[in-house]
């Protein structure tokens, strides 16, 4: 049997440097952990545009469809701000999500004990926080048509379309309920059904899936504005939050920041099972490309490393190894090692991106 | 010359009880402050539906168009959750906003010194916080067509349309720049131009208004997800935030919660000047109808009272009186008076809704 295959797309900004640390982990698993991967590297985002005039070539897209999992660093940067919309770095990422049909984006927001003091929130509000946002990733206003800037009378109008079919809502709701069963069995579904008809349909379908197939899971519904508030007020009330693409974008960033550890948070984007039973999958840190600190050894590689832990768990059925890697990260933090984004407390040891990666490998 | 006119729409839930306290303030101004208002009361939201089968009658709508300012309490409640979309309580409020063309919704998020400990955020992150969100209120996905739930093949699809014309963006941008000039001269414009064409047009028009007519105001652009993060991480970096209807809904609730004083935050919704030079205007607290505590004397009337202070400032050119009222509120807080939403600290004096109102009148 051949080794499981990985496509690594480091992308822009700090993407390449954090991904370098992930490859150390992958190498360790190959050499010592008895888990060998076939790894291919390629370009996505601004760097792909620089080389090929497009943020994602058809060849790279085909490779992504072909592998067992994709690991992505980050895309974008001010250098590309004035590019035409159709070739912006983000379009490469959005094309991957759409064509791989990665409809369920799992974004855990977890507060690491060693870092609870680092949040802008009071310690008792966030200590022990462990919630999971399941964001729909292939539909909604991100992809709805019509879209564009049009002439209308004497002026222009910018239009985007929020669009959800029943089946698009149904499948992501199932992902959320399945996850909840492995956690605290509680799902909060988030929309603006008081203002948007698409939210009314969302609420109705999620409720139906729950009533028909997950009666054991607690479900409640919340408006997106209230959810933003509740995340700030008392985030520990949540277990799994399921929401659409745009609300998920905003709320997951808000949740990530609560933990004080943006550089720590991974994500998994999952689609339907492939022929080999593994889901289509892409793993990436929640943080962006942080061009202001790129190339300075300041970036925190942990989010990207924990994204690989999610790959072990969700793509390769290696839950025990995922936990081992997560514990290695916790140990290194407990030892006081901190990259530049996490400095400020007394008695910690500042380390560079690569020193952090090396320490995690050593802890494995 | 006749007195300035007010239409009071207490609405649902805690709306009536907080509005009762505002009428005490209005009475005080009539009797002692030398500012008489002609006041009319009417129904909006669920209570209007109960009586008339619609959340806002044409007669009430006509009155709102006719007065100098509308004061609104809150609308909605679980009793109305299963009503048809077209007659939900929220539709009454949305109709007022749309037909009065109240395009600029001003939502200050201010952390009161006496309450800085009450935030879920660390005191140094929020103490002294004073930012203003200017939310576009008459367009975007709240009102765009097409909208609805449609059949498509074998299933239904929920559709809403995000839609902004250049002139809709232009006028709210001007409101934001005008406000910034009276504050710290800094505007952050928020959209998702990396994903939505409507965001690209938004960014372009805001920049153009700045370059042509407000070159003295500092302008920067931020994505909505990042803004949610930055609000949690370091809210004091902001002065004025200008954003669209939906992002404004979510981000202003997030900002409100940072201050720990949701029951304290007012809002003003302003349109074009009327024949008498006053802007079309509606004032309402940021909090909702809180049906769970309605009728128990637990509601905090301060948000509604401070909304009246905004009316004094923006509709009636009584900035000094607005400040006097705001100082009366601060004094009462400094004296330790707290409604039920603000209990928890040592040494404070719990008071009911009406005791709070009385104390503020006494402090005037
Ligand atoms: C980079 C951008 C297109 C993307 C999004 O908006 O989805 C990012 O913010 C994210 O959350 O993954
Ligand atoms: C009640 C609701 C329609 C309203 C909105 O979504 O605008 C509210 O949340 C607000 O922010 O004023």
Image (spheres, coloured by chain):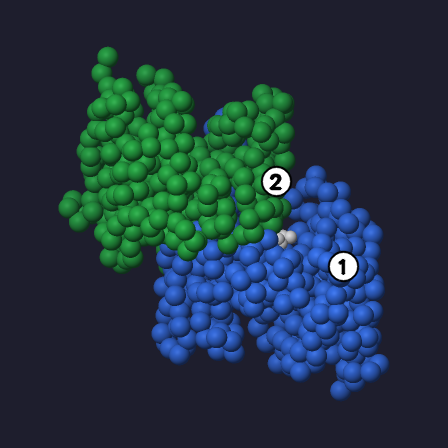
Chain colours: A green, B blue
Residue B308 seen from this side: no
Which label belongs to residue A237? Answer: 2
Along the horizontal axis of the image, is A169 left or right of A306? right
Residue at the spot 68% in from the left edge and 74% down from the top edge:
B326
Q: How far across and how far down the image is residue A267, in percent? A: 40, 37
Query: Mark on residue A89?
Result: none
Circle 1 crowding by C-alpha within 10 Å: few under 14, some 14–19, many from 20: many
Q: Are marks 1 and 2 in contact (CB under 8 Å)?
A: no
Q: Residue furthest front?
A: A347
Which quadrant would the N terminus of chain A be assigned to in this image? Answer: top left
| Outermost residue toward the top in this view | A1
Q: Name the residue: 29% across, 33% down.
A: A361
Q: Is residue A16 above or below residue B222?
A: above
Q: Residue at x 41, y 47 (%)?
A: A262
Mark 1: which secondary structure? Answer: loop
Disc 1: which residue:
B339
Q: Position of residue B217 (x, y in %)?
A: 41, 75
The x, y position of residue A216, in whole percent, is: 63, 22
- The chain letter under disc 1 is B
Is B47 left or right of A327, judged from the image as shown?
A: right
Is residue B21 depicted above or below A214 in this figure? below
In which chain is the residue bearing label 2?
Answer: A
């Amino acid at each position: 049997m051949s080794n499981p295959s990985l496509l690594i797309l480091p992308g822009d900004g700090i993407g390449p440097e954090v991904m370098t640390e992930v490859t150390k982990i992958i190498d360790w698993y190959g050499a010592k952990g008895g888990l060998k991967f076939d790894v291919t590297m390629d370009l996505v985002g601004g760097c792909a545009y620089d080389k090929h005039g497009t943020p994602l070539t058809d060849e790279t897209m085909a490779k992504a469809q072909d592998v067992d999992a994709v690991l992505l660093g980050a895309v974008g940067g001010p250098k590309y701000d004035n590019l035409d919309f159709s070739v912006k770095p983000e379009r490469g990422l959005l094309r991957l999500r759409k064509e791989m049909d990665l409809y369920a984006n799992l974004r855990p927001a977890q507060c690491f004990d060693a870092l609870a003091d680092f949040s802008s929130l009071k310690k008792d509000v966030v200590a022990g926080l462990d919630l999971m946002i399941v964001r729909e990733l292939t539909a909604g206003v991100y992809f709805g048509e019509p879209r564009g800037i049009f002439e209308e009378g004497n002026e222009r109008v910018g239009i985007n379309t929020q669009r959800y079919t029943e089946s698009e809502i149904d499948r992501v709701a199932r992902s959320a309920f399945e996850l909840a069963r492995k956690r605290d069995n509680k799902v909060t579904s988030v929309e603006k059904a008081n203002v948007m008809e698409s939210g009314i349909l969302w609420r109705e379908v999620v409720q139906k899936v729950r009533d028909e197939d997950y009666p054991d899971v607690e479900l409640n519904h919340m408006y997106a504005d209230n959810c933003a508030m509740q995340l700030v007020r008392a985030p520990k009330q949540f277990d799994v939050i399921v929401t659409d693409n745009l609300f998920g974008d905003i709320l997951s960033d808000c949740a990530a920041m609560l933990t004080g550890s943006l550089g720590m948070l991974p994500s998994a984007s999952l689609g339907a099972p492939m022929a080999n039973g593994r889901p289509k999958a892409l793993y990436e840190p929640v943080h962006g490309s942080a061009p202001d600190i790129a190339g300075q050894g300041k970036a925190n590689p942990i989010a990207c490393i924990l994204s690989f832990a999610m790959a072990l768990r969700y793509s390769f059925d290696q839950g025990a190894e995922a936990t081992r890697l997560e514990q290695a990260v916790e140990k290194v933090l407990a030892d006081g090692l901190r990259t530049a984004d996490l400095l400020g407390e007394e008695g910690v040891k500042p380390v560079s991106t690569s020193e952090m990666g090396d320490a995690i490998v050593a802890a494995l």
